[in-house]
Amino acid sequence: MEYTKNILLQMEKKANTIASEYGCQAFILMQSETEPLMSVGVQGDKRNYGPVIMIRGEYDIQKVKELSTRITNEISGISRVEMEI
């Protein structure tokens, strides 16, 4: 799948909406102005190569686990969620 700027903005907006429920912010990691940082993740029984979401603002590990699971389940294409410390 090709990730256009518009698709990435939509993904980031959805991730932020979910993250705000936990008092957090979420954004897509970019390796350049136009290219998202991509990573392999596992969704169900398949490998997925997609953008990485970074979250900031919550340090309760249970909430972080719940948040990361929601983001990867609810936003198609997101392969990994990382936490900024």
Image (cartoon, helix red, strand yellow):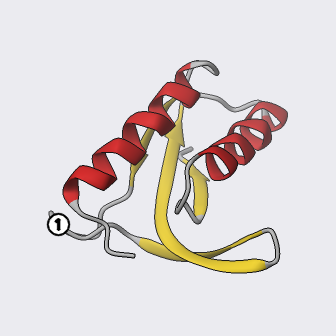
- Left or right, 5 with reference to 83: left
- Left or right, 43 with reference to 31: right
Please give the residue where the numbered disc 1 appears in the rendered image: 34
For residue 57, what is the image quadrant? top right
Q: Indicate whether 11 appears above or below 44.
A: above
- The residue lying at 56 percent from left, 49 percent from top is 75
Q: Indicate whether 44 appears above or below 47.
A: above
Q: Along the line of sight, which residue is nearer the eye, 39 or 57?
A: 39
Residue type of the residue flagged with mark 1: Thr
- The residue lying at 50 percent from left, 38 percent from top is 15
- The residue lying at 64 percent from left, 29 percent from top is 58
- The residue lying at 69 percent from left, 32 percent from top is 59
For residue 51, what is the image quadrant? bottom left
Quadrant, the N terminus: bottom left
Residue farthest toward the left in the current orientation of the protein: 33
Q: Indicate whether 4 appears above or below 61.
A: below
Kind of element beneath mark 1? loop
Quadrant, the C terminus: top right
The image position of residue 40, as x and y in percent, is 59, 79
The image position of residue 52, as x and y in percent, is 49, 61
- Left or right, 35 with reference to 20: left
The image position of residue 16, as x and y in percent, is 46, 31
